[in-house]
Image (spheres, rainbow, N blue to C red):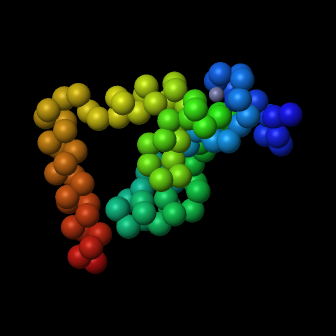
């Protein structure tokens, strides 16, 4: 009665229609990427593991096109931004630098 995917793991009431896309584990090669280019390359192939918690439409939180999070990982996702001003600036500088290096090659 709940279709091929069974029952939602959050509310346990409705059929599963979404899976959590939160990345819970990265392949080592992805963490130790050398530059922005290889980071993009490796990201294109699914070298990471996602949460995959099965949920219904109501419990899944849609964060962008084709990307849904479970309630627990949504609470982590809200903390993704660095709380420290100095670290935020450093992060921004590095992103600009990496982008420039990648596009100038
Ligand atoms: Zn649900
Ligand atoms: Zn999750």
Residue 46 percent location from the top left of the image: 59, 56
Q: Is residue 69 above or below residue 9?
A: below
On screen, residue 102 above or below 60 = below
Looking at the picture, how far across and down is residue 5, in whole percent? 79, 40
The image quadrant where one finds the N terminus is top right
Whether residue 84 is visible to the viewer of this picture, yes or no, is yes
Q: Residue at x 71, y 37 (%)?
A: 16
Q: Would you say 40 lies left or right of 8 here?
A: left
Res 77 quadrant in image: top left
Q: Can you tell which quarter of the image residue 54 is in?
A: top right
Name the quadrant containing residue 55.
top right
| Between 24 and 55, the one nearer to me in the picture | 55
Residue at x 19% of width, y 48% of height: 92
Farthest residue to the bottom: give it.
105
User: Could you tell me which residue is drawn at 29 percent across and 69 percent down?
Assistant: 102
Residue 103: x, y in percent?
Answer: 27, 73
């Amino acid at each position: 009665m709940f279709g091929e995917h069974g029952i939602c793991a959050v509310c346990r009431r409705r059929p599963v229609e979404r899976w959590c896309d939160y990345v819970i584990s990265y392949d080592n090669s992805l963490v130790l990427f050398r530059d922005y280019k290889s980071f993009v390359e490796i990201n294109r192939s699914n070298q990471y593991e996602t949460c995959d918690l099965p949920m219904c439409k109501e419990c899944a939180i849609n964060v962008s096109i084709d990307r849904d999070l479970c309630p627990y990982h949504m609470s982590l996702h809200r903390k993704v931004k660095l709380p420290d001003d100095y670290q935020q600036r450093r992060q921004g500088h590095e992103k600009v630098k990496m982008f420039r290096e990648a596009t100038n090659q």
